[in-house]
């Protein structure tokens, strides 16, 4: 597919090179010609100097034939505006915007604009390592009522079948991360020490789930 990326910083250039290595065609937009140096001499995609939400710039980047658009410049307003133009004016289906301000990110997410909240994500990743108990939200639906969360159960749950966790906490385990790889559990899957548990639940169920899994199953 053809992908247009606005912003040729560290993230944008990495995305462009990774997508191209996977066989996709890529066009990168940036206001600075110097930024394209990050792509290296072997980059075969298109580079366009300009503003990523400008219609003519987007047309030059091939937006009319694009199946995906990523706005990853260093400006929240520019990223959101560019994402909206790509989706609403050119009908690009897969659109995502990087947002630094966590408050803005949540608002735009609920408005249906897919966002990656860089600061929020980084803080969440650090907190997982500093305080590995309880739960951490990984994804929320646009309405903010359903979430995918990583939960950290009491040590006594390890060694028990995953289905017992689902029954005790009235939840659905979406998948496990085991030794760095994703695993979709079945009826015979047993929780092993070191597994990360990712569950789907409603926001109003989270406190009860944490309470149940935070104590020994014998309690």
Image (spheres, rainbow, N blue to C red):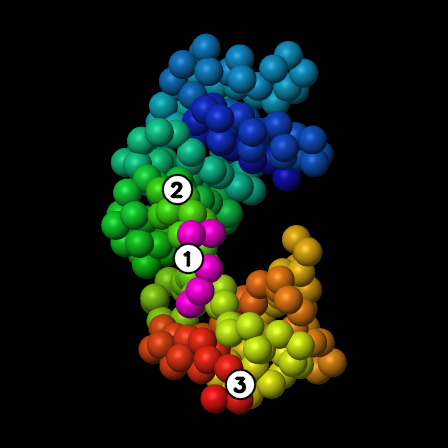
Question: In terms of secondary structure, where does tag 2 sit?
Answer: helix
Circle 1 residues within 10 Å: few <14, some 14–19, many ≥20: few
Quick one: label 2, few (<14), some, or many (20+) residues within 10 Å?
Answer: some
Residue at 45 percent of width and 11 percent of height: 33
- Cα distance between the residues tagged 1 and 2: 20 Å
Q: Is residue 74 visible?
A: yes
For the residue pair 99 and 66, the one nearer the viewer reads as: 99
Quadrant for residue 190, please give it: bottom right
At 57% from the left and 19% from the top, the residue drawn is 39
Q: Residue at x 39, y 29 (%)?
A: 73
Q: Which of marks 1 and 3 precedes in the sequence?
A: 1
Can the viewer see residue 139 in this picture?
no
Give the residue at x 53% y 41%: 68
Q: Are marks 3 and 1 in contact (CB under 8 Å)?
A: no
Q: Which residue is mark 2?
A: 118
In this view, the residue in front, 50 or 149, is: 149
Q: Magenta span has 212?
A: no
Check the picture and name the quadrant holding the N terminus.
top right
Q: Secondary structure at mark 1?
A: loop
Residue that carries the numbered disc 3 in the rendered image: 217
* Magenta segment: 129-134
Label located before the other in sequence (3 or 2): 2
The reply to whether the magenta stretch includes residue 130 is yes
Q: Are marks 1 and 2 in contact (CB under 8 Å)?
A: no
Mark 3 → mark 2, Cα distance in angstroms:
37 Å
Q: Position of residue 35 (x, y in %)?
A: 46, 15
* Front residue (pair 219, 136): 219
Mark 3 nearby-residue class (10 Å; few <14, some 14–19, many ≥20): some
Q: Is residue 183 left or right of residue 126?
A: right
Q: Secondary structure at mark 3?
A: loop
Percent x, y of residue 12: 49, 29
Q: Position of residue 104 (x, y in %)?
A: 26, 47
């Amino acid at each position: 597919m053809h992908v247009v990326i606005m912003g040729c910083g560290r993230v944008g250039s990495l995305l462009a090179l990774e997508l191209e290595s996977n066989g996709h065609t890529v066009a990168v937009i940036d206001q600075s010609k110097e930024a394209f140096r990050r792509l290296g001499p072997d980059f075969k995609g298109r580079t366009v100097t300009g503003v990523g939400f400008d219609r003519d710039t987007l047309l030059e980047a091939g937006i009319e034939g694009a199946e995906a658009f990523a706005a990853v410049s260093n400006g929240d307003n520019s990223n959101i505006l560019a994402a909206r133009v790509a989706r609403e004016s050119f009908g690009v289906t897969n659109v995502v915007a990087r947002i630094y301000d966590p408050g803005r990110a949540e608002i735009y997410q609920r408005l249906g604009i897919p966002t990656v909240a860089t600061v929020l994500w980084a803080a969440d990743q650090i907190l997982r390592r500093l305080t590995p108990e309880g739960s951490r939200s990984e994804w929320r639906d646009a309405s903010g009522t359903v979430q995918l969360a990583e939960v950290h159960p009491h040590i006594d749950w390890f060694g028990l079948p995953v289905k017992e966790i689902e029954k005790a906490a009235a939840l659905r385990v979406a998948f496990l991360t085991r030794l760095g790889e994703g695993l979709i559990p079945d009826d015979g899957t047993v929780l092993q020490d070191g597994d990360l548990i990712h569950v789907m639940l409603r926001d109003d169920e989270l406190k009860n789930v944490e309470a149940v899994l935070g104590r020994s199953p014998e309690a």
